[in-house]
Image: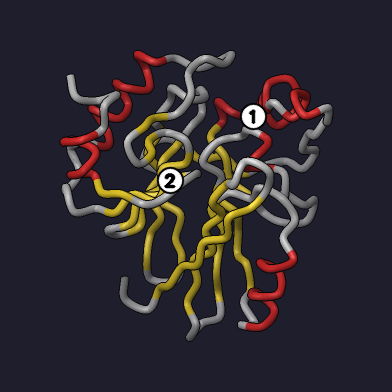
Amino acid sequence: MDKLEFKVFVLGGLSTNCYLIFDRETKKGFLIDSPCFSKELNEFVEDENLKIQFIALTHAHFDHIGGLGESREFYIHKEDIPLLKDASLNFSSFLNSSFTVKAQPRLYQENTLLPFNSHNLEVIHTPGHTPGSVCLKLGKWLFSGDTIFFDSIGRTDIPGASTDLLIKSIKEKIFPMAEDIIVYPGHGPSTTIGREKKCNPFLRN
């Protein structure tokens, strides 16, 4: 994408992908998900003299929100607010932790456009893995969180999740997009919409 670059940092015990999108000319950037504190990420931001404008969350499970600080502006879908406040809902309690977020988020909803330089980050509500899961589209890049992966989909054997709703979200909101759009998920390697339509074993029927 013209002028924009991104770098992925694989962070935390669940190897969560944290994406830093930035513009070297304006020195502005933003994060997609914030799994945990990262010395590598912080050093890169400092070395490039970047100013992080905001954090856009795909959903509020602990492995995507563990790095949120009190001072940074972050966005989330309103349906995932309860997960920020409850360790049993964000699953940090399963690791004998009680992580919660006290800071107040900014909220986005279906079709919200977050401006960044001359671009817009489009919010696509894709409930199923969590009630407030979203995918974030920036040109030909789709950051899918835990909605869809290479050859897989998000877990639905957890409270608040629904297999039927997740598959509906993917087939009605993601699959109609151009097949050459590159999907960058919350875990694992990238893929394309075209490939997942043809090969994903969870989505063939």
Residue 8: x and y in percent read 51, 61
Q: Label 1 amino acid? A: Ile
Left or right of residue 106, residue 189 in this image: left
Q: Is residue 4 left or right of residue 194?
A: right
User: The residue under label 2 is which amino acid type?
Assistant: Pro
Does 186 sit above or below residue 128? Answer: below
List the residue tagged with mark 1: 81
Estimate the x, y position of residue 203 in percent, counting from the top left: 25, 25
> Does residue 86 show up?
no
**Residue at point 56% right, 16% down?**
158
Identify the residue position indicated by label 2 in the image.
185
Task: Give the quadrant of the C terminus.
Answer: top left
Q: Element type at marker 1?
A: helix
- For residue 4, what is the image quadrant? bottom left
x, y (%) of residue 44?
A: 64, 75
Using the numbered discs, state the Cα–Cα distance from disc 2 to disc 1 in whole angstroms.
Answer: 21 Å
Query: Camera-side residue: 43 or 68?
Result: 43
Q: Residue at x 16, y 47 (%)?
A: 179
Q: Residue at x 16, y 48 (%)?
A: 178
Q: What colouring method underlies this structural image? A: secondary structure
* Dot 2 or dot 1, earlier in sequence: 1
SS at mark 2 in the image:
strand
